[in-house]
Image (cartoon, rainbow, N blue to C red):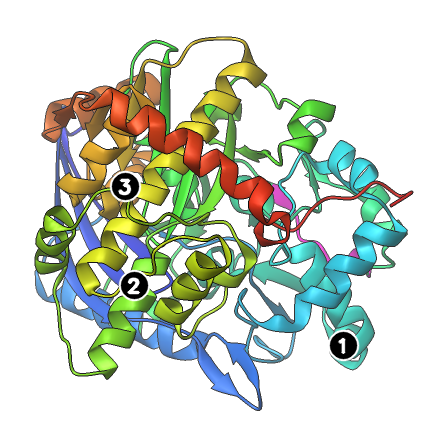
Amino acid sequence: MKKDHCYIACDLGADSGRVMLGKLESCWLTLEEVYRFSNGPAKINGSLRWDILRIFEELKIGLRKFADKNIPADSLSVDSWGIDYVLLNARQPMLSLPYQYRDARTEAPYATALETYGSERIFSETGIQFMPINTLYQLMDDVKHNSDLLAVADQFLLVGDYLNFLFSGVARAEESLASTTQIYNPKSRAWSQQLIRDFQFPAALFPEIVKSGTVLGPMTPAIEEETGLSGIQVVAACSHDTGAAVAAVPAEGDDWAYLSSGTWSLIGVELQAPLINEAVREQNFTNEAGYAGTTRFLKNIIGLWILQECKRDWARDGHHLDYSEIDRLADEALPFRSLINPNAPRFLSPGSMPEKIASYCEETGQAVPESPGQFARCIYESLALRYRTTLDQIEELIGRNISRLHIVGGGSKGSLLNQFAANATGRTVLAGPVEATACGNVLIQALALGHLPNLAALRDVVRTSFSIRTYQPEQSDEWREASIRFASLKTLNPLLQTPACPSPNK
């Protein structure tokens, strides 16, 4: 077997997509960005949709650029965010543009499901955190308002799986992505037949689930002709971007947690089995499938999305700031002037983010941020304090100590936020790799093709190949006092918290 292999990772995020070349030479991985394009929802008749055909065309542009390099690749895999899906049938590869998860259509079905069905029953079946954006509530809306489409649909595919289907012609649901839907049972590792029956979903919609790292088959002849590539296998690696990123966390032992930091902050630990009990439900944690049968026990926190939206607002007002300048201004701003709960529902939807922060601070009796530096400092400190409370909750739920926090993804580049995370949590922070999702995507392809033996070897490659920066806690007294104030925000206005998960009797 040759020692050098090349792989193509198509990595889709909410704001951008990339085609990446991953080259594995013995136990050393290098990554090269071949093509990048902007991404984002389109507004159509008052709804938010993904222009999935444009995304597909952009990926093919990237593949043609890869072909121009004349580098033979072994395989290709697509990863994406979770939850959103495409409806299709045998004649029509797409019946409508898929909705974007921030579309408001899920609010009513979310409330209906919790009121009439109850969070205990849903959670016992799925072990998934309650968020109105989940696939369960999107499908509920389709049953009510798009029954004509469901009647002619053969199946649905989540975004990453759908693009793997377009490249390979093989329609499968990869389990890390399927597990985000809140219709997947992590104990049986199958679709929840109980929820499918109870919510009257057409059973035929649900595709066959395959394990992470399944070889789907060769690229279709039409795609080969269109891109100039040949001899490439399409792999369902971890089609969920966070699943791929967690696989690439360069950790050892069991006293560590991970934070996949980007538009969302996904913070959790890796377990060998799902943890589903009343305490987990009450604290709204989630059990998603990880590589090699592991469980990603985590909580989704609204992350750098809040700053991204502020940055867009400032740019519309003529203040064009890059992130290095924002970090400098935040570093110069007065500490702990104002704090927010990042998971307050108002921060989930787009638009007027500085105004939303200002109104939150007014309602909670705090100074209102007045400058980009003050807004950014408020966001960074609030995120870091949310990390602290979440890690403390995880320790209590799993019954073991966490001494290290591995931060991966684009947010790991932010040295100020990384230092705040160390300060707030009182734990050592290890930042990197930035391209954790692409690393995981590529190296799971290597595992699928037999070029690496196991998950431990994958993480050895990541540790060898990428530099990791260490941050030690500082200013512990100031952050301890801030954490007390942060906790009090709950009692000042409980309506600002993440939507509750009521019991059937509430």
Q: Earlier in the sequence, mark 1 or mark 3?
A: 1
Which of marks 3 and 2 precedes in the sequence?
2
Quarter of the image with the N terminus in it:
top left
Q: Secondary structure at mark 2?
A: helix
Question: What numbered label is drawn on residue 308?
Answer: 2
Q: Which residues are drawn in magenta? A: 202-209
Q: Does residue 207 show up magenta in the picture?
A: yes
Labelled disc at residue 435: none
Label 1, label 3: how far apart the Cα atoms are:
36 Å
Q: CA distance from mark 2 to mark 3?
A: 28 Å
User: Residue 16: image x %, image y %?
Assistant: 29, 65
- Amino acid type of the residue tagged 1 in the rendering: Val
Q: Are marks 1 and 3 in contact (CB under 8 Å)?
A: no
The front one of 282 and 135 is 282
Q: Position of residue 97 (x, y in %)?
A: 55, 79
Q: Residue at x 51, y 37 (%)?
A: 488
Q: Which label was assigned to residue 152? A: 1
Tag of residue 442: 3
